[in-house]
Amino acid sequence: MTPLWDWGYAFSILPRLLEALLVTIQITVLGSLVALVLGLVIAVVRRARIPVVDQLVWAFVEFVRSTPLLVQVFFLYYVLPHVGIVLSAFAVGVIGLGVHYATYTSEVYRAGIDAVPVGQWEAAAALSLPRSRVWTGVILPQAVPRVLPALGNYVISMFKEVPLLLAVSVVEVVNTAKEISSETFRPTEPYTIAGLLFLLLSYPASILVRRLERRSVAV
Amino acid sequence: MIVFDGVEKRFGDRTVLSDLNFSVQPGEHVTLIGPSGSGKTTILRLLMCLESIDAGTISVGGSYLSHMEKGGKLVPADERHSRQVRKRIGMVFQQFNLFPNMTVRGNLTEAPTRVLGLSRDEATARAKELLDLVGLADKLDEHPSRLSGGQQQRVAIARALAMRPSVLLLDEVTSALDPELVAGVLALLRDIGRSTDITILCVTHEMGFARDFSDRVMMFDGGRVIEQAPPAELFTEPREPRTREFLSALLSRG
């Protein structure tokens, strides 16, 4: 009878899983970039209350938030090619995750912007600062630092959502574990290692976020 | 310098200012007094374009603030026009409203460089001059959070002056200060009043200050000017019963 856990086997599959982890990290980093930038744009556009644009953005945000990420990913991967837009599975992962989470980070930014005292807007207006400078020089430098922990938490969530992309065959960690186990009929080691790899990165990251939180409370 | 002509301001169905007419001469110091909710602060906020008016016109230095001329007709001002006229107006707030993400230097040079187009060096030189004037020469690179309320308000005054305004609006600038810090800020304002020709419009509850600082005091009630006179006259022999009531209430409060 084979033992439940075989160290030799575990070490033999580790390189493949680490390679896949690199893909997971790449998607997380690029997806976060999309989520952090697009979320900020959404928050600022909505705050500017430009008629029509505001409603369109609102509808888009509500739509994205009310439908499952999986459906959005399938849509990007299988439907867009019919209108001539062909994206790689990797690109679908980055865009799908990024846009989905942008609708959440936009809410975080909004809360941060709302927390800036109205007197700051008024002082900026009294000095005739141009609109763009009011945002970049006065409002965002105060709003963003206090929401960094919340944004950090979303980045960690995104990291843990990457395995969902196995649905469109992205070669990330869990997909690779699945492949290995179906090749060798030994699921214990690949899935355990996959889980541990996530734990190894998420846990320190969440400690980092908690430390950020404490610091921003102290400020 | 400032002309309010038939100005009306409503918040929802509450009329805050109705058919308000007054003007302020260049270099004049005018204090607005009256019970809270009488519309004094609203006047300052209208001048700062923080609120819009519902009827009438406001002009500053000969150009319309609330409106602009377009094809021979008066139309409501757009943001660019308002900003242009507003550049001549500085405001100091009750809560200072310094930018906490910048040093004192940043607070004082931000608008001069971004709006007036001064170079960094010019703006810093002016910032140093103004800090000297307000007695905080050693605080150039301090963060606002490390300053006392009185010091913050002095920086806020310097920040407004850095824009070389021809009109300065003071909105209860000592109301948020600890009592022992009030005198210093008021002394500074007296100093500025004496040494410059800036037109000053001031809302305050400091009647002693209003008396020796202003050329004219306007008493507001229910969104109207019910009485106006030089301070010596208004404080000693107010004509309107409402003014008398208000002043005696203030005095009995101490």
Image: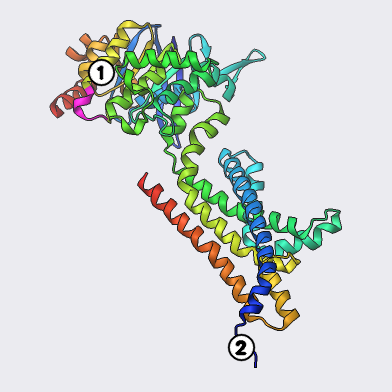
The answer to whether residue A46 shows anywhere in this view is: yes
Q: Is residue B16 left or right of residue B215?
A: right
Q: Is residue A31 left or right of residue A182?
A: left
The residue under the point 47% across, 44% down is A145
Residue that numbered label 1 is attached to:
B186
Q: Quadrant of the C terminus of chain B?
A: top left
Q: Main secondary structure of the magenta part?
A: helix
Residue that numbered label 2 is attached to:
A3
Q: CA distance from mark 2 to mark 1?
A: 85 Å
Residue B34: x, y in percent? 28, 24
Residue A73: x, y in percent? 72, 62
Q: Chain of mark 2?
A: A
- Badge 2: residue crowd in 10 Å (few <14, some 14–19, many ≥20): few
Three-letter residue code for mark 1: Leu
Q: How is the image coloured?
A: rainbow
Q: Is residue B244 magenta?
A: no
The answer to whether residue B87 shows anywhere in this view is: no
Tell me the magenta residue range. Answer: B177-182
Give whichever of B53, B83 is nearer the camera. B83
Vertical placement of residue A193 versus B139, above or below: below
Give whichever of B53, A84 is nearer the camera. A84
